Image (tube, rainbow, N blue to C red):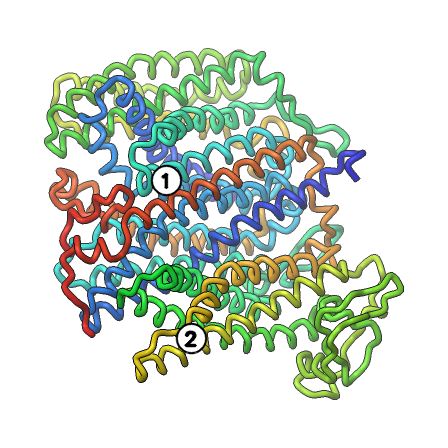
Amino acid sequence: MSYELLGITILWIFLFGYLLVASIDFGAGFFSYYSTISGKRHIIHRIIERYLSPVWEVTNVFLIFFIVGLVGFFPDAAYYYGTALLIPGSLATILLAIRGSYYAFSTYGSRDNRIYQFLYGASGLLIPAALSTVLAISEGGYITEQGGKVSFEFGKLFTHVYPYSVILLAIVSVLYISAMFLTYYAAKAQDEPALQVVRKYALFWSLPTILASLFVFYSIKGHNEQHFNNMVNNGWMFVMSFLFFLAAVWLVWRRRHYGIAFVAVMLQFGFAWFGYGKAHLPYLLYPYLTIHDNFTNPAMATALITVFVLGLLILIPSLFLLMRLFLFDANYVKGIKNDKGGKGGQGNSGATKA
Amino acid sequence: MMATYDPVIFSRILTGLTLFVHIIYATIGVGVPLMIALAEWIGIKRNDTYYLLMARRWARGFTVTVAVGVVTGTAIGLQLSLLWPNFMRVGGQAIALPLFLETFAFFVEAIFLGIYLYTWDRFKNRMVHFMLLIPVAIGSSASAFFITTVNAFMNTPQGFDWVDGKMENIQPLLAMFNPAMPTKVSHVLVTAYVTSAFCLGAIAAFAMIRGRKHIYYKKALKLTMTAALVFALASAAIGDLSGKFLHEYQPEKLAAAEWHFETSDKAELILGGILTDENEVKFAIKIPFALSILAGGTPDTVVKGLNEVPEHLRPPLRASHYFFDMMVFIGIYLTVISLAYVIAHRRSRKTGKPVSRLLLWGVVLGAPLAIMAIESGWMFAEVGRQPWIIRGYMTVAEGATTSAHVDTMLWMFALLYALLTFTCVKVLIKMFKHNPAEDEIIARGIEGGHK
């Protein structure tokens, strides 16, 4: 495996990690806000909060990791995407900033501030929309280079079908992945009323997910024939993805093995994600940038990969510890061990004994 | 200047603004975990529940500032590529390693902070919970370490061959461990500790001024001021070494800070004053030999003057000097105040008289001043490197984006930062006003500490 391929594979794995954890996070934010409007907040809010509180900060790091790594391995990516994506990139940054900080403000500070909740919930759908346009842009046709000047044709994003299909898929998947996860988490917590609510969300969003996926497939054919043909050549991966989708939905439908159902969801998206990514290669940006153009120097590539391996040695046990304490610890999930060091704000912190 | 749109100017302002905001939260993010760790450790060792409560309360406030630190850090991470694509394209070849390492350090910090915050009473052995904080403190300081090596590289680039406007034969470790690295990194770290100690100390001092008499506040002040004194002395020592580093590797920066024009020995240190258009220094306090001593340890050290640097390669002189002076003055102030408090605390213990209100006000004032010192230190560091983005190889103008609409982005981000800072302060005040330490002491059933 060449350094280039190794580099992009590592980055793609991290972006997949982001896709999963961020989807859970974004979707949960939306459901949390939606439940406020629909009067079901008291049923599902605790489940959502118990999961999100300790992990929200980790989510962002996956994205930063991808971006820093992309620029590190492929410095030209900074040049093309950096120049072209000033506006969408800045907008996404601002949305991420609003989301991250208002989560903390509303969780640790003002508990029931509706505006904070709205900002938090709404940004959760806008961020995947903004970020997924980058995937659409990478298909080519929006960034052009003429005479050493890179420019971005923003208007075209609105006149093509393909960006819409990607955005649609992103939003629908966020809700589907998140609902599937919350179903598992609620089942784990043995919180039957919450389970009923989130299970319905999960089933509700399953069909739109598959329809949106087909829509993307269809529209990419019109947009980037080469990529489409590559995807067809790797068709088995998408077939696998579909089979895991069926498995996941069937299990949730039959109300059993929610954990395995969520694993199936991860595999569903895993196969689709890597099938899409594999077909995209060698291009990082059609038709200007491939993974072979101005790849970082061998010394740096070795250094980055070494660091990555050493980093994983620290990271994997740490993530495992995090999951063990907050995901797989039945007592925590059920809310039995639930001390947050006092939560300040409304003076409810005295609830726990020092 | 505004008549024609210049993406370079707006990129500089926007980057400057993001860093201006981020550095406040980043400094707190680096320093406060250490203070929390000190408090929790003392609390466990002396079995003093007040210190444990201190750690708990600090950690709670810290979470809110971390959130803003994370998002502003994300902003600068993205802006590096969005506003400086050419810099990243060229420089990325050499500095990718520390940037990559920084994300790992932050990853570890984020994971363990999440665990730490939600496991206060989950372990029978309290030391286990304390141990969870160590990766947080190491992670945040390591983040600062790695990012500062990037800034150091921009000042004293090395570890590559410059071939046709590109970096080749890269030696990533050599690029990271460049001459500016040791003094810069250590200066950033210890000043973050001083600033954080003062911010936390100021809260306690303010409560005491408002008439709170609980021993909790005295303990908080004693801990923070002792730490502040130790780290303030350390930053003075490192500041001295930084002078010697600049003399050796970036003489134009030192000369700009000190308005030193003629190369000479027995050079004098200039404090304050104004610079006329004819480059004459007026109304300044001049300390004989001091600049030579700062630069090389002896009055005989020959200090290079600005006249040897072509005018278009000189940093802005006035800004460099005033930012440098402000940083130094505030540094001295913080050292004096923390020393005064440590002495006063000992005396008040013997005589039983409380520490004077004036000194308490001095501590309160120390917090905003310390943040100003951090800001001016960074301003000096950045302004003093002009016109270079990578000293000697690439100018700031060459590194910037050519994109349109940077000006619009500037306004949007300005609005965002104002909103975030406003809400952050509001939330913090609310958190602690509604739940003062005394209430929490009663609510948690703490009868009394060790003393």
**Number of numbered callouts drawn:** 2
Residue B118 spot, x, y in % from top left: 24, 49
Alpha carbon of mark 2 to alpha carbon of mark 1: how far? Answer: 34 Å
One can see residue A240 in this view:
no
Is A38 drawn above or below residue A337 in the view shown? Answer: above
| Chain of the residue that carries numbered disc 2 in the rendered image | B
Q: Nearer the viewer, residue A80 or A4?
A: A80
Which residue is disc 2 drawn over?
A: B341
The local crowd at label 2, few if under 14, some if 14 to 19, many if 20 or more residues have their Cα within 10 Å, is many
Judged left or right of residue B299, residue B100 is left
Question: Which label is found at residue A105?
Answer: 1
Q: Are marks 2 and 1 in contact (CB under 8 Å)?
A: no
The amino acid type of the residue labelled 1 equals: Phe
Residue located at (74% from left, 34% from top): A148
Residue B342 spot, x, y in % from top left: 40, 77
Residue located at (44% from left, 57% from top): B28
**Do the residues indicated by labels 2 and 1 lie within the same chain of the protein?**
no
